[in-house]
Amino acid sequence: MPDEDLLLDSVPPEFGSGVIGVCDICGQRQAVIVLAKERYKLCVLDFENKAWIRSTARPGVPALPFTSTTELVPSRAVRTGQVRAVVLSPTKVVKRPSAIVVPDVYGLTAQALEAGVRLAHEGFEVILPDFTRLEGMNLAQWARMRVSRTLSGGVHISQSRRELALRILEDCRRYVRERPMVLADKQALFGFSYSGAWALAYAAETPEIAAVALAYPRMVHPPGLLENVRGPVYAVYGDQDSTAGDDCEQLREAARINGIPLEISVLPGAGHHFLNRDLRAYRPGPAEEAWTRLVGFLKGRLFPTPKPPPTPPVGIPGRTSATPSRPTPLPTPSGTSPPPSSGPRGIPSRGA
C-alpha cells in the first residue's frame, strides 16, 4: 500500500483539513487538501498530477471546475527566453478576471498552490510562475531579502534596475491577459510574506492591477515606491506575528500618506505562515477565516456586481382600465331616503 494511503485514511473529511504525504504518481511530496467537500490530492512539485481519492470514478468524472496546465511563458528576463508557469483555467465558458499568485524563492509551495486552487474555484484565471528554476532566484536571493528587511525595515527594491521577479510578473501578466476568456482590464495580485513585498512593488509600477490581496506581507523599501499604487489593498496577519504587524503598520502609514485604499485584518491565535500546510505554524481555523476574507475581497473588487431583479410593472401610464371602478356613494343625511338610481338616459328604474 502506498504511503499516502495511510495518511489519507487519517484525514477527517472536513472543509480545509489536510496533511503532507508522498505522491504515488511522481514520488514527491504532495498536499492532501479537502476543498468544496471533495477530496483530491495536489502534487506540490508537479501540479498536473491530480486524481480522485476514495472514488471508483475515473479522474475527470464529474468534470472538474478548472483545468491545470504547465506552460512556458515567453520572457526576456531570463537567458532561456521562457519561464515555466502553472495556469489554472475554469471550465465554465464565461468571461472572467485573472489573478497572479506571486510565489517566493521557495517556488510553488503548498500555500501558493492552495491560493491558486481557491481562486480558480471562484472563477479566476490563475497563473503561478515557478521561480525555483530560474537563475538568480535561489536561497542567496532569499538571504538578501531577509538582510534588507532586518536592516532597513523593508525588502529593498532597486529603483535603478528592475528586479528579476518584477520582470517575470510583467511577462506573466501580459501572457494571461491574452487568453481567450480573460477580461484584460480586471487583473489581481496575491502574495504572502516576502512575495507580498514583490506584489506591492509590482502593483506600484503597474496601474492596470485592480486589487492586491496579501497574507502576512513584508513591507517594501523605500516606502515611497507605493505612491503609484492605484488599486485597493487588503492584508491579513495573525496577532502572534509581531514582524508582520510592524510591516503592516508601515504599510498603513504609507497608504495614509499616498491615499491608497487599504484594509487590514488581524486574526487571533495565528503566527507567521499560518496558511502554510507544510509548516507547524499552520492553523486550520484562522487559515479558513483568512482564505474566506482574501478570496472574498478579490471577488468583490473584480467580479461585476449582479444586477437587481426587474421591478414588476405597476401599470401603463396614459391608459385606463377596461372596466371602470364603481364610484363610492355619497353619505345620506339621516331621516331621508337615498335618491333613486337612474337607468339609461336618466330614466328612473322601476323600483323607484
Image (spheres, rainbow, N blue to C red):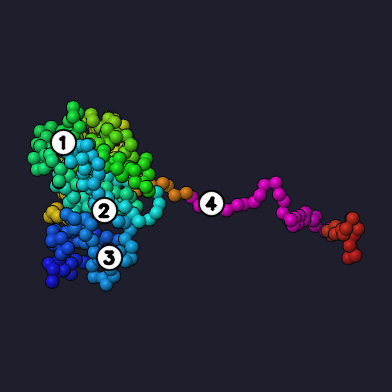
Nearer to me, 240 or 273 = 273
Pointer 2 local density, CA inside 10 Å: few below 14, some 14–19, many at least 20: few
Q: Earlier in the sequence, mark 4 or mark 2?
A: 2
Q: What stretch of residues is rendered in magenta?
A: 308-336
User: What kind of element bears circle 2?
Assistant: strand
Q: Residue 114, image x and y in percent?
A: 23, 54
Examine the image and state in which quarter residue 3 appears. Answer: bottom left
Q: CA distance from mark 1 to mark 4?
A: 51 Å
Residue drawn at 85 percent across, 59 percent down = 341
User: What kind of element bears circle 1?
Assistant: strand
Examine the image and state in which quarter residue 257 appears. Answer: top left
Q: Residue 151, image x and y in percent?
A: 10, 33
Kind of residue sitting beneath label 2: Thr
The residue that mark 4 highlights is: 310
For the residues labelled 2 and 1, say whether their Cβ atoms are less than 8 Å apart.
Answer: no
The residue that mark 1 highlights is: 155
Q: Earlier in the sequence, mark 2 or mark 1?
A: 2
Pointer 1 local density, CA inside 10 Å: few below 14, some 14–19, many at least 20: many
Q: Residue 62, image x and y in percent?
A: 33, 65
Residue drawn at 27 percent across, 47 percent down = 127
Judge whether residue 150 is colored magenta.
Answer: no
Q: Is residue 135 visible?
A: yes
Q: Which of the numbered marks, if any, corresponds to residue 69?
A: 2
Q: Earlier in the sequence, mark 3 or mark 1?
A: 3
**Tag in front: 4 or 2:** 2
Judge whether residue 315 is colored magenta.
Answer: yes
Kind of residue sitting beneath label 3: Pro
The residue that mark 3 highlights is: 59
